[in-house]
Amino acid sequence: MSDVSIRSESGSGRALRVLIIVPAYNEEGSVGDVVREIREHLPDTVPVVIDDGSSDGTAVEAAESGARVVRLPFNTGIGTTVQTGFKLADREGFDVAVQVDGDGQHPPLEVTRLLEILRTTDANYVIGSRFAEETGYRAPIGRRGGITVFARLVSLLTGQQLTDTTSGLRAADRATIRLFAEHYPHDYPEVEALVLAKRAGLTIREVPVEMRHREAGRSSITPLKSAYYMIKVTLAVLVQFLGRNPTPKQ
Amino acid sequence: MNRLVLIGIIVAALVLVAVLWLIRSRRLQERHALFWIIGAIVIAVLGISEPALNAVSDALGIAYPPSALFLIVVAFLGLALLDAVITISKQTDRIRSLAQDVALLSEQVHAQSDADPHTTVRDPSSKPPER
């Protein structure tokens, strides 16, 4: 394991070790490009593809593009997949773990904006938001509605104005990595993770980012699943709000 | 002793024998076995003994004694199901956690077994770890 780092511009000279978590399930058509882009634009980071039991050539593509590849023995869902990345970051002492999607929606250069906020502010958990200000991204109309509902719900529960609670582009510092290595929601984790982080006393910030449309593969959210998604996430968020406060292990 | 009571005794005896056989062949853990044995005995006693059932239905304020028996059976099955679902949830969490550890450890093993850690994990399933 090489000691790859991003130079700190804050003058301390301390190098941050950054892990880029790329969860992928049957994304052989795009995962290689995602990794190559990360390696080109963010050469001081360590990309790791977490292959969630893919049945296609995802692991081979990922390895050939130069990423570390962690293969789950069977399909476990996005939450467990992403948490595997956080566990890796925790065990190997990474300072920052960035989560991007394996389908090429997130331009790697946007990651630097998230890292900048982590470095220069008190934020523990930085979310790349498609809506924090006007960007080129337009979500499909149905999803926009759902996204708005969750934004309201999470804002209400956390007391913080958040605009894009389903964004899959996020950066976590040590405290957040420790928390998520221990506790992370299992399916449809994006919204719940925010409430979890907030309740653990972590500081969340949003950064406006540009997103592209998907390169290959299909969104995991079909119209039929949307209803289940809405109900499940709402329930999970409410249950979590009733539960005990999670604390990051020391 | 009427025919129905006889059937009740036979069914209860069959359940007991089945539970004991499952314990012997180690397919049922004692914790669950105890639950099923006690349940089978209680239901058998209430099914066979009319005075016992009448006493229970009086205590519960149920006018028609067989309803009390059904209520107890449904409650018992509900508890058994809840116990099973709790067990499944716990097992699911553990399996998840094990899967994550297996994935992380096998990446480490394959990284160590090759000079270049970035090109080793082509197909871990087909490649035994080298010493």
Image: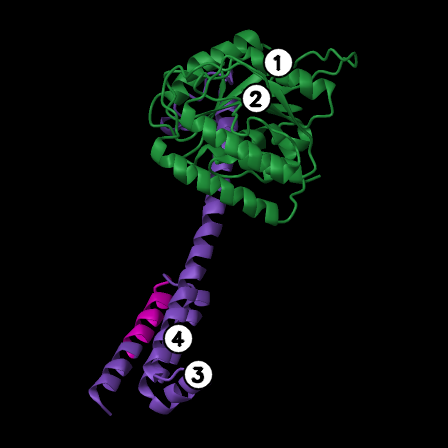
Chain B is which colour? purple
Count the marks: how many?
A: 4
* Residue that label 1 marks: A112
Find disc 2 in the rendering and name its residue.
Answer: A129
* View extreme (left): residue: B3
Mark 4 neighbour class, 10 Å CA radius: few under 14, some 14 to 19, many 20 or more: some
Q: Spatial distance from mark 3 to mark 4, Cα to Cα?
A: 13 Å
Q: Which residue is mark 4?
A: B72
User: In the picture, which quadrant includes the N terminus of chain A?
Assistant: top right
Chain-order first, disc 3 or disc 4: 3
Q: Which mark is residue B89?
A: none
Q: Amino acid at mark 1?
A: Thr
> For the point 50% across and 12% down, which residue is it?
A136
Mark 3 to mark 2 CA distance (whole Å): 60 Å
Residue A197 vs residue A50: left or right?
A: right
- Left or right: residue B38 versus residue B111 is left
